[in-house]
Image: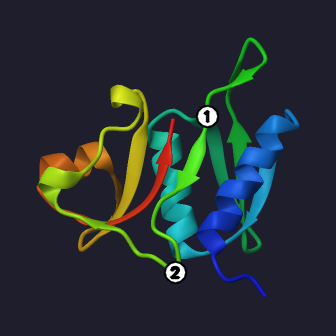
Amino acid sequence: MMTDPISDMLTRIRNAQLALHKDVAIPYSKIKYSIANILKEEGYINELTLNNGTITLYFKYYKGKAAIEGLRRISKSGRRVYVSTHDIPSVQNGLGICILSTSIGVIGCNKARCSKVGGELLCEVW
């Protein structure tokens, strides 16, 4: 039984990119689809498709190196991490993004700062 589906998603992405796969299939859920959409908007993946209850992410590579250098889960099932607008962290000195679950939905840190909302800090991507 899977206890943390977001960690599973991040691990699947990390493992697929280390193996230089061109895509990865992830079981569908609303929050995972929202996170994948943010990765596409921020330019970390090329394409995103949804079919038969599966999200397929197509990776972006440049000279054999993946666009996503690292992923890290922040708020875990055993220890939730919440931040206010002023406490949203900068990831890799502004070169990465953090993803938050807020009252207006799952959004990236830049949009959260502009909208002046805080929430649960789900993960960091750089």
Q: Which residue is mark 2?
A: 78
Give above or below for 66 relative to 38: above
Give above or below for 65 relative to 75: above
Picture quadrant of residue 70: top right
Q: How is the rendered protein coloured?
A: rainbow
Q: Nearer the viewer, mark 2 or mark 1?
A: 2
> Mark 1 packing: few (<14 Cα in 10 Å), some, or many (20+)?
some
Task: Give how far apart the Cα atoms at labels 2 and 1 are.
Answer: 26 Å
Residue 11 at x, y percent in the picture: 72, 56
* 1 displayed left or right of 102: right
Q: Amino acid at mark 2?
A: Gly
* 25 displayed left or right of 8: right
Q: Which residue is mark 1?
A: 68
Q: Earlier in the sequence, mark 2 or mark 1?
A: 1
Element type where label 1 sits in the image: loop
The residue under the point 65% across, 74% down is 5
Element type where label 2 sits in the image: loop
The residue under the point 79% across, 58% down is 25
> Mark 2 packing: few (<14 Cα in 10 Å), some, or many (20+)?
few
Of 68 and 36, the residue lying toward us: 68
The residue under the point 50% across, 52% down is 37
Query: Quarter holding the N terminus?
Result: bottom right
The residue under the point 17% across, 62% down is 84
Residue 55 at x, y percent in the picture: 69, 61
Residue 4 at x, y percent in the picture: 63, 76
Q: Amino acid at mark 1?
A: Ile
Of 14 and 74, the residue lying toward us: 74
Residue 16 at x, y percent in the picture: 81, 45
Of 48 and 11, the residue lying toward us: 11
Give above or below for 115 relative to 70: below
| Residue with the most extreme front position | 79
